[in-house]
Image (cartoon, coloured by chain):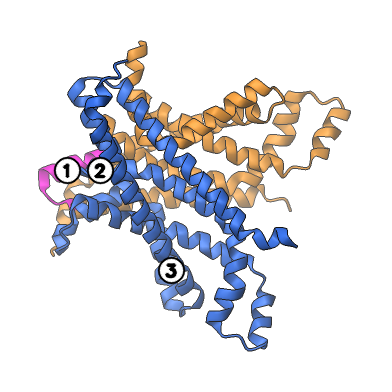
Chain colours: A blue, B orange
Amino acid sequence: MEFDLFLRYGPALLTGFGVTILCWLVGSFGGLVLGFVLACLYRYGPAPLRWVIYAYVEVIRGTPFMIQLFILYYGGPHFGLLLSPIQAGILSFIVYGSPYFSEIFRSGFNAVPHGQVEAARCVGLSEGRILRRIILPQMLVPITAPLTNFFIILTKETAILSVVTVPELLYETQTMAAETFTFVEPFLVLSLFYWLMVIGTSWVGAKAEARVTRHLRKA
Amino acid sequence: MNFSFDVIWHNLPYMLAAARWTLLISLGGMAISLVWGVFVCAARISSGAVLSRLAALYISFFRGVPLLVQLLLFYYMLPYVGLDLPAIAAAILAVGLCSAAYSAEILRGALQTIPRGQTEAADALGIPTFSLWRRILIPQAIRIGLPSLVNELILLVKVSSLASVVGIGELTRISQNITGETYRPLEIYVAAAVIYFLINLVISLLGRLAEKRLQVA
């Protein structure tokens, strides 16, 4: 073990960690928002739109992330979509994550008893208000854990961005490994970084879960 | 934009041959995942504190580190400890051991839904632990956990694309090579996506069939 290597490569590794966090946060929150929109369109939209969303969900969930990234990054220029590696990475993250998020939201919608929605319509609440005041507060309870779960899965998918030369954590680590002919030290530190991210995410997830179940404990 | 089907048609035989490696990695990974997953799950819920802690650590590590990193670790670090595996073996092992952590958790979740009374009843009847697991717990756990397990298997097929980084000529790697020769990334990667999608379609159909068969009338 040669730990003085980290003095030399520490800054590069930390920058890589920053890029990883950037791609992860922007990509997964983008996917979260797009997934919510898809789930709402699936619920309230007309039938043809529902089929389109269904096909989108099935196709994206049925193909590897790496292939999607390649289609976007290498295939994009074929139809005039020239993206930098980081842009392609974030965009493909949003595309990849959204169907999973939309499925989680869909299961949340289904968890709220339909009778409550009918009752709310009877007392004259608008659809927007029903969504905000009745469905959302209740559906957040069962879906917070799966959402956290998927955020954690996405932290680790960021490693794949290294194959299209996004200068993220794994990319910097591989550079360090190749330049110094060490493998044990860089990869151990790398694992530690990811583990930290995962622990942090589950901590935030636990806080969020406590927040959305507040009304259940008060009673 | 001009999408050329000729490029796909010419290279399809190579891609299908490469898909066999994808299948080999996925199937090998599945086998390790399911068998080893049962053991990890058994260790996790066993009453031995050390064994249970070890299993928890195993699950935490394999779920907490990206698979791409695990693959590189297996491929580059095992030779350090004198275990020089061929790339394909390292890939199958990495994929299988990682997936086993997930399978173990799926099975643990499924086992928790089986009423404790069944275990107690089996104890009262003097059924040995091995038979209890083989005849009573595992068949039920598999039935309950089947949708999640099928999910995991589909993930495995997609995850096998990561094996391309350690130089295995599976579907993604060969697609990269063909792209390098033809400069037609769009066509080739779309074709690769279709092949992956078809494989997964078959798995999810088989899963649905199995669910139907295992359903209790």
Residue type for callout 2: Met
Magenta-highlighted residues? B173-185
Instruction: From the image, tell me which residue sits under label 1.
Output: B178
Q: Which chain is home to disc 1?
A: B
Q: Residue B6: which quarter of the image?
A: bottom left
**Category of crowding for the residue at label 2, using alpha-carbon neighbours closer than 10 angstroms: few (below 14), some (14–19), many (at least 20):** many
Camera-side mark, 1 or 3: 3
**Along the horizontal axis of the image, is A128 left or right of A69?**
right
Q: Describe residue A128's horizontal placement relative to residue A91 as left or right.
A: right
Q: Chain of mark 2?
A: B
Q: Are marks 1 and 2 in contact (CB under 8 Å)?
A: yes
Q: Which residue is mark 3?
A: A38
Quadrant of the frame with the N terminus of chain A: top left
**Residue lying farthest to the top in this orientation:** B82
- Mark 3 or mark 2, which is nearer to you? 3
Q: CA distance from mark 3 to mark 2?
A: 33 Å
User: Who's the residue at 15% across and 52% down the image?
Assistant: B7
Pointer 2 residue: B15
Q: Give neighbour class at mark 1: few <14, some 14-19, many 20+ (Cα, 10 Å).
A: many
